[in-house]
Amino acid sequence: LGDNVSTNSNQFSANVAGTYTFTISSTADDCESTSSSVEVVVGGVSLPATPVITAPDQVCEGSPLQVSTVVVPGAEYIWTLPGGGIASQREINIPVAGPEHSGRYSLEIQSVDGCRTAAVSKIVEVNILPPLVMAASQSGVFCEGSSNILSVNTVAGATFTWFKDGVEISGANASQLEVTETGAYYVALSNALGCTAESNVFSTRKVMQIQA
């Protein structure tokens, strides 16, 4: 800059653009040592001190997922995605979230001057429900006077809703159902996050017993 600033500190806050060097002088023998120069750019793009990532903590498998940050005009967005991928847009839009989208999203923002924010990150969990496979205590055909027990795997904290011929069965909210009538049955599951899954359809037929 051409201006000299005396200080007893080994740090200096530069708030004016220019080329800076640091010289250390010994009062004992008048020896001096000068550092290499550093170019300081002031102004340009104003970067946030700490970028904020906007994203849900959890999202259902198959649902859309958006991970984004603030708008910084003229800046470059440097995302590191789960699995090690790189992205450069401000918003990451995933139409159908899957297991590969679960994990840590890290972000740095860089200005055209080369200044860069500290890295921040957010972990997003893609909630994956297990497949519901229906089992039956008997085959699809059962005799009048008996019943067929249909069941699916239990899922902790989930709510089950059974259907017969496409119509909800009132009060049938367990992982198994005792069937005494002919029909096509399936069960739907919903967890606390609102993620849903449906089982396969199992058809049963009640037949009359032949009297001897």
Image (tube, helix red, strand yellow):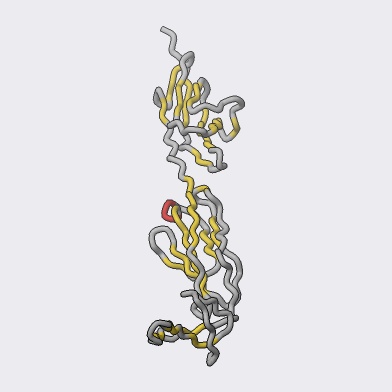
Give the residue at the far top of this rendering. 212
Q: Nearer the viewer, residue 187 or 183?
A: 187
Give the residue at the far front of this rendering. 28
Give the residue at the far bottom of this rendering. 2
> As drawn, is 171 to the left or to the right of 116?
right
Q: Find residue 164 and report its horizontal and vertical position in percent.
A: 55, 30
Residue appearing at x 52%, y 22% in the figure: 181
Residue appearing at x 48%, y 28% in the figure: 175
Q: Nearer the viewer, residue 2 or 78?
A: 2
Q: Find residue 95 and report its horizontal and vertical position in percent.
A: 52, 58
Q: Nearer the viewer, residue 143 or 95?
A: 95
**Residue 37 drawn above or below residue 199:** below
Using the rendered view, name the quadrant where residue 152 is placed: top left
Q: Find residue 165 and report its horizontal and vertical position in percent.
A: 56, 33
Q: Find residue 32 and report its horizontal and vertical position in percent.
A: 40, 86
* Total numbered circles: 0
Using the rendered view, name the quadrant where residue 43 is placed: bottom right
> As drawn, is 37 to the left or to the right of 189?
left
**Residue 39 drawn above or below residue 129:** below
Quarter of the image that includes the C terminus: top left
Residue appearing at x 57%, y 72% in the figure: 47
Residue appearing at x 48%, y 64% in the figure: 119
Q: Nearer the viewer, residue 85 or 204?
A: 85
